[in-house]
Image: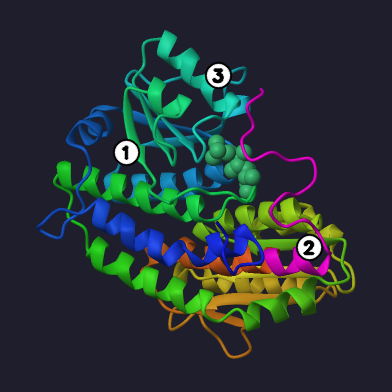
Amino acid sequence: EKGAYPHYMLKEIDEQPAVIRRLIQKYSGDNGKITVDPDVIQAVTDCDRLYIIACGTSYHAGLVGKHLIEHLAGIPTEVHISSEFSYNMPLLSKNPLFLFISQSGETADSRAVLVKVKKMGYPTLTLTNVEGSTLYREADYKMLLYAGPEIAVASTKAYTAQMAVLSFIAVATAGRKGLALDFDPVHELSIAAQAMEQMVDDKAQLKEIARDFLSITRNAFYIGRGLDYYVCMEAALKLKEISYIQAEGFAGGELKHGTIALIENGTPVLAFATQENVNNSIRNNVEEVLARGAHTCIISMEGVTEQPGDQIVLPKVHKTYTPLVCAIPLQLIAYYAALQNECDVDKPRNLAKSVTVE
Ligand code: M6R
């Protein structure tokens, strides 16, 4: 039940710090170390390439997962949109493992791939929020998101839970392979949960951003680089889905290859700048669109990329976990933009919570 909340979406956004804390408990052992089912980690370690298959928000979590699994565990990983995979199948490696990410576990496009690759004899792993769902039942290995029921059509807490669990897969696989990490994942993830809490407790600034940047516009752009780019793709999807504002997430470096032609006087461009290694480049991109009249907003991170004049400064977290913290502003900005546009936040037009047809 949504209790005192006006919308399930807002309730589910607020639940995210608690979901992350629950996940730490579920996936850490008595020794305080991340612990994942040894059979799952064996399967990940044994594969020569991981193929992540998902749709929508789950696909965006998968992109972050690829970054973490490749960087921390050294397992080559590809991410594919389920509906594209079947007829556009890449050349597969010798020993692939297929990882299906699905909040509902019922997405038909993803199931079609699962059925196909099982027939080909490949091992499958499902990461879902719904125990006993179709994708859960039909996969060889399974992991749960423990996010609690997600009612709003727009996925929020499942997205952050997916990214957290993908980080556990990365960390546990690194452990199995004897690769040393230069940070304590449990500690850093607790700090991220704390930062998320701070963000959900400070909604006023995000409401203002929605008002200042998105109240009279028909379109908006998110730009970022690296992990921030993946965050931008999710930010744009969330905004489109519930506020009906046409939005796209772009890789900062791609602007000059075409997109910048769209910038007019007043076009809202929101930039995520939480990654130290691309901070200068993304700020240059902001300058470029500013010079063409864009209305720009920078979302940066305390002590990492922050500069005077940044509109939103997120509390500092380890670079592995920035997308978890970015999720809160991107979701709340979309939420307030949808309210401004008097949209049905929990049940956007033309959409269903689980897409059970191909
Ligand atoms: O249940 P799934 O995670 O498989 O659903 C995938 C997408 O349909 C879903 O993430 C969709 O994009 C959301 N409504 C986005 O908020």
Question: Relative to 59, is 216 on the left or the right?
Answer: right
Q: Earlier in the sequence, mark 1 or mark 3?
A: 1
- Which residue matches tag 3? 112
- Please give the name of the residue rendered at 80% of the width and 60% of the height, measured from the top-left corner: 260
Q: Nearer the viewer, residue 280 or 27?
A: 27
- Which residue matches tag 1? 75
Label 2 element class? strand
Q: Which label lies toward us, 2 or 3?
A: 3
Label 3 element class? helix
102 is higher (above) or lower (below) than 73: above
* The N terminus lies in quadrant: bottom right
Q: What is the x, y in percent for residue 287?
A: 71, 76
Q: Which label lies toward us, 1 or 3?
A: 3
Queried on whether the Cβ of the residue with tag 2 lies below 8 angstroms from ligand 1, the answer reads no
The CA span between labels 1 and 2 is: 35 Å
Q: Which label lies toward us, 1 or 2?
A: 2
The quadrant holding residue 137 is: top left
Q: Amino acid at mark 3?
A: Ala
Residue stretch in magenta: 335-358
88 is higher (above) or lower (below) than 347: above
Q: Is residue 169 visible?
A: yes
Q: What is the x, y in percent for residue 222?
A: 69, 62
The CA span between labels 2 and 3 is: 34 Å
> Label 2 near label 1: C-beta < 8 Å?
no
* The C terminus lies in quadrant: top right
Q: Is residue 340 magenta?
A: yes
- Which residue matches tag 2? 220
The quadrant holding residue 328 is: bottom right
